Image (spheres, helix red, strand yellow):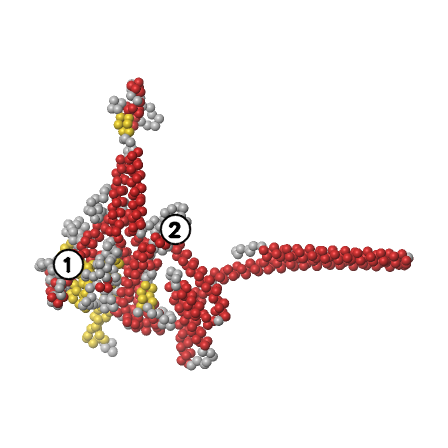
């Protein structure tokens, strides 16, 4: 049965439409029709942009063929940008919006939700990846990306048992499984009411296509027979729907699922069937009502909430590049060796057609050939200098136009990893990368925000609809160290008004990883931590009460580093532990009550892991410092051993010299005394004289000997000092 599909194009009051299946259909058919008319130009443009992307295009705006040779820079730019924006499956971080250091229940609830979301991504990685990639591609091509969260469950009827385990004859629904799937929606399958901003959106509609069998299963055979079926086309607009060679063989009914924010109702209609197919209350019951996050939308203005594709802003440059490239190709074909020759000299033609290297071509009537100017007089070549000059000029203009295109789109050469100038320094390159990629960074943040909002909706669906048993099993909390807190944490998750969980996907977690930049960032991070700990360690040692303040100061200082939030939780736990230790010390030696002892035991149990985490973090941060101190101590020990060896050798040498001199002196004295006694027995007078002279000589010899000893001692001491100074100034030995 066919129905009149014509509708009004204006609505004065919603009360003009009866609150009946027929009245609601007429109202929504009007809304959808008007919205389709408004989106039709955008859809047509998007279809052509997609053809441009895959290389099947003519002029996007003018409708003229740009030529036989197209330089598809648009495809290259979109692929490069897509890879930069999305290179990894996202990692989801969950925290309580108003987190407190001592809020253990809130901490465990955030951990449970984080497990649920990341586990779902891990188990359905290919599906989630496909959703994000398709959404991103729609944003880069058409200007709008969208994904929708739903709720599904399976149950079965089971007999009700009495207290003795016997069937009572009654049945009840038993939950088998439940899920919150994330589905991609093609940009052409979405309509919305007239508005200027997202927060003023009155309604959203999502299109799907059902076969007659599917429609019958959902709404019955009678309804399925009266629906209108047509082939599903790849095109978004209504142009050439029925004659496209790529249409599906299946005949399907076009079904619109409409979310009405004013009434908090959901309605299903099919154009041509004059009643609503279904009309029910909000099935998700989430705070913001919409099952989708704000659109991942391009170039929207406050005049009307409709995207403008990025391609539109640079389409003239893309078309100009194609025209220039086409002219270059045409002129290149014209660069050939072409000439004319004297028809009477047929043998000249054979020189080019048959001649090989080192061949001589005979010329008949050589004298006449010479009179006519020889070879130069017989052949005249087509001049190529002007053609080659034009070709070079076209190439220059094309390259300049490509440069303008890259500036317009933000895809500069520096974003692709190249240098504009081989003489540019590293500092200049870093500066150009910083400021040249601002638009790309903004787009990365926008994509991460979209992904975060999508997962936020999924978390809200889980909180409101998943049973506590499902949450417990899915999060695998059976063996958690915080098993005593799991029950209260799940209750907090189910109380969405109190939980206030914040879902975040950081841009760096989904973007392509720059390992060199990541290494540099973490090196700077560790250096900052090491310097802070070196400077504050003496203060904390002198006054342990300053430790919580110093840790808070460390947390504040590290907040400026990318990725610092990963360690902020560890610092929070360390601050909490320090505060508790300080409080315990302030309470003195008071005898605790049994209740306090039990509480302390529980706290120690809960903080055991925290202490190990803190100790590991501090050990990792001090690793470099410990290595440096070890190298210094090894070097100092080596210097001290060497100096001790030199000093001992010098002292031994001095002692040896002194012993030798003293032995010679005693020997000389003994010999002298013997001579005096012998001489005194024979000639007393002369002995006297000789004794006096000898004593004078002895005095001189002793003075000489003493001077020699002092000289040798001074020399030895000077050698010791010189060797000691040389050892101190010698370079430190490198550690093995």
Mark 1 to mark 2 CA distance (whole Å): 53 Å
- Mark 2 Cα within 10 Å, few/some/many (few <14, many 20+)? some
Of residue 485 and residue 403, the one placed in the foreground of this image is 403
Looking at the image, is 590 positioned above or below residue 345? Answer: below
Residue 125 seen in this snapshot: no
Q: Mark 1 points at which residue?
A: 33
- Place of residue 727 in the rendered image (x, y in percent of width and height, measured from the top left): 60, 56
Residue 340: quarter of image: top left
Residue 249 in the image: state x and y as whole percent.
Answer: 16, 53
Q: Which of 303 and 70 is in front in this view?
A: 303
Of 78 and 61, nearer the camera is: 61
Give me the disc on residue 429: 2
Q: How many labels does the image show?
A: 2
**Which tag is nearer the camera, tag 1 or tag 2?**
2
Q: In the displayed image of the protein, which residue is found farthest to the front?
A: 303
The crowd level at tag 1 (other Cα within 10 Å; few <14, some 14-19, many 20+) is: some
Q: What element carries label 1?
A: helix
Judge whether 16 appears above or below 687 on screen: below
Of labels 1 and 2, earlier in sequence is: 1
Q: Can residue 237 be seen in this view?
A: yes
Residue 38 in which image quadrant:
bottom left
- Relative image position of residue 703 (x, y in whole percent): 77, 57
Q: Give me the residue at 30% from left, 19% from top.
A: 371
Residue 364's disc is none
- Element at label 2: helix
Q: In which quarter of the image is the N terminus?
A: bottom left
481 left or right of 7 in image: right
- Residue drawn at (48%, 67%) of the image: 537
Picture quadrant of residue 654: bottom right
Q: Which residue is drawn at 26% across and 47% down?
A: 317
Label 1 with label 2: CB-CB less than 8 Å: no
Residue 260 in percent (x, y) is at: 19, 65
């Amino acid at each position: 049965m066919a129905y009149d599909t014509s509708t009004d194009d204006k609505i004065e009051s919603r009360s003009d439409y009866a609150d009946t299946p027929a009245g609601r259909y007429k109202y929504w058919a009007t809304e959808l029709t008007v919205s389709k008319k408004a989106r039709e130009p955008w859809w047509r443009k998007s279809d052509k942009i997609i053809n441009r992307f895959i290389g099947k295009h003519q002029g996007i705006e003018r409708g003229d063929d740009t030529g036989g040779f197209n330089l598809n820079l648009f495809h290259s730019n979109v692929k490069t940008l897509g890879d930069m924006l999305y290179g990894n499956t996202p990692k989801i971080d969950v925290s309580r919006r108003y987190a407190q250091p001592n809020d253990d229940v809130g901490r465990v609830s955030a951990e449970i939700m984080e497990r649920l979301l990341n586990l779902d991504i891990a188990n359905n990685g290919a599906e989630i990846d496909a959703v994000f990639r398709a959404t991103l591609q729609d944003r880069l091509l058409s200007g709008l990306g969208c994904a929708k969260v739903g709720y599904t469950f399976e149950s079965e009827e089971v007999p009700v048992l009495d207290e003795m385990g016997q069937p009572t004859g009654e049945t009840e629904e038993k939950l088998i499984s439940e899920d919150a799937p994330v589905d991609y929606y093609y940009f052409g399958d979405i309509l919305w009411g007239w508005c200027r901003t997202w927060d003023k959106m009155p309604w959203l509609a999502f299109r799907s296509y059902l076969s007659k069998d599917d429609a019958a299963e959902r709404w019955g055979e009678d309804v399925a027979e009266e629906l209108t079926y047509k082939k599903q086309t790849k095109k978004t607009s209504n142009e050439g729907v029925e004659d496209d060679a790529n249409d599906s063989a299946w005949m399907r009914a076009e079904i619109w699922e409409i979310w009405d924010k004013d009434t908090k109702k959901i309605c299903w209609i099919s154009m041509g069937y004059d009643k609503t197919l279904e009309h029910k209350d909000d099935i998700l019951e989430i705070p913001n009502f919409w099952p989708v996050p704000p659109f991942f939308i391009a170039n929207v203005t406050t005049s009307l909430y409709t995207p403008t594709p990025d391609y539109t802003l640079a389409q003239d440059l893309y078309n100009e590049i194609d025209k220039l490239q086409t002219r270059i190709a045409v002129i290149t074909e014209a660069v050939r060796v072409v000439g004319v020759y004297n028809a009477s000299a047929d043998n000249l033609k054979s020189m080019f057609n048959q001649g090989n290297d080192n061949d001589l071509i005979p010329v008949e009537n050589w004298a006449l050939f010479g009179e006519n100017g020889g070879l130069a007089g017989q052949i005249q070549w087509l001049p190529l200098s002007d053609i080659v000059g034009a070709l070079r000029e076209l190439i220059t203009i094309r390259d300049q136009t490509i440069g303008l295109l890259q500036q317009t789109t933000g895809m500069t050469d520096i974003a692709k990893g190249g240098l504009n100038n081989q003489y540019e320094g590293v500092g200049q390159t870093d500066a150009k990368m910083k400021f040249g990629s601002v638009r790309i960074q903004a787009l990365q943040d926008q994509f991460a925000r979209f992904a975060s909002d999508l997962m936020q909706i999924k978390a809200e669906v889980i909180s409101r609809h998943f049973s506590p048993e499902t949450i417990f099993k899915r999060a695998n909390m059976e063996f958690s160290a915080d098993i005593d807190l799991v029950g209260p944490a799940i209750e907090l998750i189910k109380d969405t008004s109190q939980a206030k969980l914040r879902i975040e996907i950081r841009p760096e977690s989904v973007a392509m990883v720059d390992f060199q930049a990541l290494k540099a960032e973490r090196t700077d991070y560790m250096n900052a931590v090491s310097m802070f700990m070196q400077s504050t360690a003496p203060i904390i040692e002198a006054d342990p009460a300053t430790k919580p303040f110093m840790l808070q100061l460390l947390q504040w200082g590290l907040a400026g580093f990318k990725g610092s939030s990963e360690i902020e939780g560890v610092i929070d736990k360390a601050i909490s532990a320090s505060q508790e230790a300080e409080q315990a010390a302030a309470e003195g030696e008071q005898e605790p009550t049994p209740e306090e002892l039990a509480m302390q035991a529980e706290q120690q149990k809960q903080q055991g892991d925290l202490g190990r985490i803190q100790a590991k973090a501090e050990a990792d941060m001090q690793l470099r410092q410990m290595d440096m101190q070890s190298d210094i101590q090894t070097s100092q020990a080596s210097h001290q051993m060497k100096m001790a060896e030199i000093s001992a050798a010098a002292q031994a040498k001095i002692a040896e010299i002194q012993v030798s001199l003293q032995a010679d002196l005693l020997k000389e004295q003994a010999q002298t005394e013997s001579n005096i006694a012998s001489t005194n027995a024979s000639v007393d007078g002369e002995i006297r004289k000789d004794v006096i002279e000898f004593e004078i000589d002895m005095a001189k010899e002793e003075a000489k000997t003493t001077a020699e000893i002092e000289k040798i001692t001074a020399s030895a001491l000077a050698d010791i000092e010189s060797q000691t100074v040389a050892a101190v100034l010698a370079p430190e030995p490198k550690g093995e």
